[in-house]
Amino acid sequence: MQRILILLASALPVALSAQQLPQSSPPGEVEQVIGLTEVEIDYSRPSARSRKVFGDLVPFGEIWRTGANACTRVELDGPVNVGGKAVAKGTYCLFTIPGANEWTFILNTDTSLWGTDGYTADKDVLRVSAKPVTTTDHVETFTVGFDAVRDDKAMLELRWENTRVGIELSADATEQALANIKATMAKPDLKAGNYSRSARYCVDKGVMLPEALVWAEKAVSMDKKYWTLHTLALCQAANGKYKEAVTTANESMAMAQQENDPGYVKMNKARIEEWSKK
């Protein structure tokens, strides 16, 4: 019995060391595709816990790990324009320097850091400034996220306590998207959706407009729906065919009303009013 007790006692520290407990600043992850480029951010999420955060817990004017524990890592699977500056594909640490009226965002190539220990500015690849906004909503736990995600742009935002601050990320996918469209159009047995999506992308970007009109007409001939008609109307207008665009938009709006889709009704109505003046 004594031998058994001794063995149990010797095993206890190992069992305790393997014990899993909730973390005060648990790990978080956020991903977003911008254009055709994937951006992934891994970070730790401290909570305010009734403390004054910015200007106290996180001092102004000093470099911050932008979270807790290990440095916050940003992985880009393609080149991205960050706050107006080009950054190559790769993995970086995200540091910030908070301030009452201005923040500095920093990307650094040393991803092995625990917090700011060992940080050196000579490994920075980016420094850009941003203006913080004071909000009325209290954010208890530090949060990294994306907002205003549209086409090939998005806002990378940091939120904590009553502060929100962000920078714009953009990844121009036009060249690759057009290459993808051309490759798709070379394939046999295309569906209406292939034609309509390709036409809509081109008309939104203002490129390959004559081709977009042909594709939109093809989509409607294969599958006449109020959304394919709306794309056709946009392509007609983009090619200066305003009279035809108004007629097509009216047909799209009528079908959208029958299908009880107020969004398309509103979009068509606005376009009809715009094109009728031309």
Image (tube, rainbow, N blue to C red):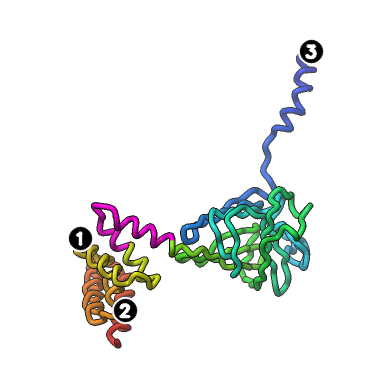
Question: Considering only vertical position in the picture, is 271 above or below 62?
Answer: below
Q: Secondary structure at mark 3?
A: helix
Magenta stretch? 176-197
At a point 67% along the width and 71% down the height, the residue shown is 129
Q: Main secondary structure of the magenta part?
A: helix
Is residue 106 rendered to the left or right of residue 87? right
Task: Return the mark for residue 222.
Answer: 1
Q: Secondary structure at mark 1?
A: helix
Report the quarter where the C terminus lies.
Answer: bottom left
- Residue flagged by tag 2: what amino acid is it? Arg
Which-is-in-front pick, marks 1 and 3? 1
Residue that extends furthest to the bottom in the rendered view of this protein: 277
Q: Closest to the observer: 47 or 178?
A: 178
Task: Return the mark for residue 29.
Answer: none
Q: x%, y% of residue 65? A: 72, 57
Is residue 276 rendered to the left or right of residue 126? left
> Quick one: label 2 or label 3, which is nearer the N terminus?
3
Q: Is residue 179 magenta?
A: yes
Residue holding disc 3: 3
> Quick one: label 1 or label 3, which is nearer the N terminus?
3
Q: CA distance from mark 1 to mark 2?
A: 24 Å
- Residue flagged by tag 3: what amino acid is it? Arg
Q: Closest to the observer: 71 or 186?
A: 186
Is residue 36 rendered to the left or right of residue 131? left
> How many marks overall?
3
Q: CA distance from mark 2 to mark 3?
A: 87 Å
Q: Closest to the observer: 52 or 218?
A: 218
Q: Quadrant of residue 55?
A: bottom right
Q: CA distance from mark 1 to mark 3?
A: 83 Å
